[in-house]
């Protein structure tokens, strides 16, 4: 796949371009939509294979595979009226926008594949869920850290829901830090220590030989501090509240 278009050069569009352009192998040619001119110009200045197009139709025309990375509500303005030939491959990364919905907007017979790329794709460190499996799209994301094709959009929505918990993790860490500061610890010390704790945790996640439950058990002394916080804070009521929030998000994503 040598010619890739990106419509929507925002946070995730830029991460995809950086990931595709930053490897040792020959980078594909990449064609960007013109909106967000500064970001597009920066990318084309940094990477030899990146060009900014005059409009979204030119992005489609010059590409074999087109990635749609605008915010969901902007899709009609960005896409309605475009001509997308049946020979193209369209990758839909818009959260909560089903392929049938996108097909109506684009009025095309092209192959449509949903995907959940995440910002670490920039460094090729993120597994991307795709649906349906498509050899070209899966090969593209394999290059960026791994593809995880799933059987149907019902399963895809479950992965989207799990992805929706990411920023809560940052807020959890911020809550630990502010609690420590409220108890008289210097803010930069608390920040440094909390980051270090959880960077260490991230490292252990790379050990696929141990289940998540096993990793937790291996870090927990019987009757110790970790067990105490887990059993007094992450109670079954807390766990049920989390499942309820996930169920509610899943229902919203399935409504589209
Ligand atoms: N950020 C993330 O981690 C992830 C995001 N996504 C999905 O990716 C999509 C983009 O998210 P994100 O990158 O965060 O959003 P951003 O707001 O950062 O980027 C969206 C970009 O689309 C541009 N845009 C808007 N309208 C048009 C148009 N008519 N033609 C061309 N470009 C247009 C915007 O320009 P302007 O700023 O001028 O409005 C902006 O640059 C969303 O649908 C989101 O659900 C999926 C997975 C992860």
Image (cartoon, rainbow, N blue to C red):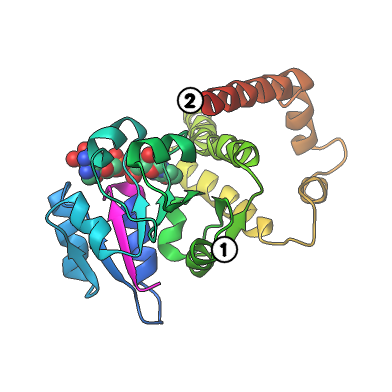
Q: Nearer the viewer, residue 243 or 234?
A: 243
Q: Is residue 29 visible?
A: yes
Percent of width and height locating residue 234: 72, 27
Q: Label 1, on which residue?
A: 146
Q: Is residue 154 depicted above or below 201 in this figure?
A: above
Q: Is residue 61 left or right of residue 71?
A: left
Q: Label 2, on which residue?
A: 182
Q: Is residue 76 left or right of residue 162?
A: left
Q: Does 222 lie within the magenta span?
A: no
Percent of width and height locating residue 196: 54, 52
Residue at image coords 50%, 63%: 141
Point out the quarter of the image occupied by ligand 1: top left
Residue at image coords 49%, 70%: 143
Q: Does 4 lie within the magenta span?
A: yes
Residue at image coords 32%, 48%: 11
Q: Is residue 79 left or right of residue 239?
A: left
Q: Is residue 126 depicted above or below 115 in this figure?
A: below
Percent of width and height locating residue 220: 80, 44
Q: Nearer the viewer, residue 81 or 43?
A: 81
Percent of width and height locating residue 148: 61, 56
Q: Nearer the viewer, residue 19 or 30?
A: 30
The N terminus - image quarter: bottom left
Look at the image and give the residue range highlighted in magenta.
1-12
């Amino acid at each position: 796949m040598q010619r890739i278009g990106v419509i929507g050069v925002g946070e995730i569009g830029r991460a995809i371009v950086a990931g595709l352009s930053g490897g040792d192998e020959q980078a594909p040619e990449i064609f960007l939509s013109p909106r967000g001119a500064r970001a597009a110009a920066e990318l084309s200045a940094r990477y030899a294979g990146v060009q900014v197009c005059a409009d979204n139709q030119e992005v489609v025309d010059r590409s074999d595979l087109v990635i749609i990375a605008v915010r969901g509500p902007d899709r009609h303005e960005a896409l309605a009226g475009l001509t997308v030939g049946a020979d193209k491959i369209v990758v839909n990364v818009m959260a909560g926008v089903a392929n049938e919905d996108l097909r109506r907007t684009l009025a095309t017979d092209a192959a449509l594949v949903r995907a959940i790329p995440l910002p670490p794709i920039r460094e090729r460190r993120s597994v991307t869920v795709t649906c349906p499996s498509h050899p070209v799209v899966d090969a593209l994301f394999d290059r960026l850290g791994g593809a995880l094709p799933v059987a149907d959009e019902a399963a895809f929505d479950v992965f989207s829901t799990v992805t929706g918990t990411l920023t809560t993790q940052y807020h959890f860490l911020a809550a630990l830090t502010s609690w420590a500061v409220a108890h008289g610890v210097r803010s930069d010390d608390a920040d440094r220590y909390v980051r270090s704790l959880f960077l260490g945790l991230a490292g252990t996640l790379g050990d696929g030989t141990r289940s998540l439950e096993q990793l937790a058990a291996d870090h927990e002394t019987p009757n110790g501090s970790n067990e105490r916080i887990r059993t007094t804070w992450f109670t079954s009521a807390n766990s049920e509240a989390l499942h309820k929030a996930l169920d509610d998000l899943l229902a919203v994503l399935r409504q589209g």
